[in-house]
Structures are given as structure tokens and as C-alpha cells.
């Protein structure tokens, strides 16, 4: 199992055909001061599964600050069999963040995807003051 995409965006969705639509990828939440929330924010991961990958897999997505302080955490699972020999599948994970999610200080943050204790991938973003 491998993370091939990890981004923070204004919004994201999965179409009926299984395609991933992502709008407004960003790496900075501009602000005049903290604490601040992002009115529109989704965390997006795409995972490639190959034959032999173990299933089911318990997943955790968390957002931590530069000091490792946890801001929020979600739990999910991948349920299903491994792909057929010679094939792979892409699984899209879209987590719309509630407007109540607050970033308490300026600096960098990391949205991490974990399977148990294994860190699979991260999307790095920051909260920064608006340029004067």
C-alpha cells in the first residue's frame, strides 16, 4: 500500500465513476491573526493497493502542528480483498474538514495518514499572516 497523492484543497469529491475531483489545492491558510479556521478545507489522499496488500486495514488521519500536538483525528478502514495478480487499485480518501476546525497558532501543520503505527504519507500546509 502506497500513498500517491496527499493534498489539502478547498474541496474534493469522488464521482460516480470513481474519479477524484479536487478543487483549489493550497499550502497556506492566510490570516490576520490566530486562532483561525479554514472555511473550506478538505484533506485528500489517494492510496495505491497492489496484490498481496493486507485487508482490512484500519486507517487514521490526524492533523498535527510543528510540535506534534494533535489538532484533530479521524478513523476509517479499508475493507475488501487485495487486487487480482498483475493489477492495482487506487482508493481515494476525502475528508471535508468542519468549519469548526481551528488552528491555534501560526506555523506549519501536517495532515498524516497512518495505518496502525505506520506513517503512510502527509500533506504539509501552513498558517501564515497575510502580507501587509
Image (cartoon, rainbow, N blue to C red):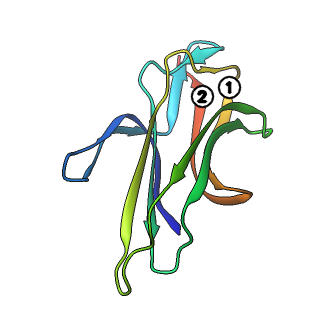
Residue closest to the far bottom? 86
Does the image show residue 62? Answer: yes
Locate residue 132 relative to residue 13 in the image: left or right.
right
Residue in the foreground of this view, choosing between 9 and 27: 9
Where does residue 21 sit, x and y in percent of width and height? 27, 45
CA gap, disc 1 and disc 2: 5 Å
Residue in the foreground of this view, choosing between 34 and 129: 34
Which residue occupies 44% across, 69% down? 81
Report helix, strand or loop for mark 2. strand
Mark 1 neighbour class, 10 Å CA radius: few under 14, some 14 to 19, many 20 or more: some
Sequence-earlier tag: 1 or 2: 1
Where does residue 20 sit, x and y in percent of width and height? 29, 49
Locate residue 57 relative to residue 42 in the image: left or right.
right
Mark 2 neighbour class, 10 Å CA radius: few under 14, some 14 to 19, many 20 or more: many
Question: Where does label 1 land, which residue?
Answer: 106
Question: Where does label 2 land, which residue?
Answer: 127
Locate residue 80 relative to residue 89 in the image: left or right.
right
Which residue occupies 45% across, 73% down? 82
Dot 1 and dot 2 residues touching (CB under 8 Å): yes
Residue closest to the far left? 17
Where does residue 121 sit, x and y in percent of width and height? 59, 57
Where does residue 99 sit, x and y in percent of width and height? 49, 17
Q: Which corner quadrant of the image does residue 117 belong to?
A: bottom right
Which residue occupies 65% across, 14% down? 35
Amino acid at each position: 500500500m502506497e500513498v500517491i497523492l496527499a493534498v489539502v484543497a478547498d474541496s474534493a469529491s469522488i464521482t460516480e465513476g470513481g474519479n477524484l475531483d479536487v478543487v483549489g489545492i493550497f499550502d497556506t491558510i492566510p490570516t490576520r491573526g490566530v486562532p483561525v479556521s479554514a472555511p473550506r478545507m478538505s484533506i485528500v489522499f489517494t492510496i495505491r493497493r497492489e496484490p498481496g496488500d493486507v485487508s482490512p486495514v484500519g486507517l487514521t488521519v490526524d492533523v498535527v502542528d510543528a510540535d506534534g500536538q494533535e489538532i484533530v483525528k479521524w478513523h476509517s478502514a479499508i475493507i475488501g480483498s487485495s487486487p487480482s495478480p498483475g493489477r492495482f487499485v487506487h482508493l481515494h480518501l476525502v475528508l471535508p474538514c468542519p468549519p469548526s476546525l481551528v488552528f491555534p497558532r501560526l506555523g506549519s501543520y501536517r495532515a498524516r495518514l497512518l495505518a496502525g503505527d505506520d506513517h503512510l504519507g502527509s500533506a504539509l500546509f501552513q498558517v501564515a499572516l497575510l502580507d501587509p
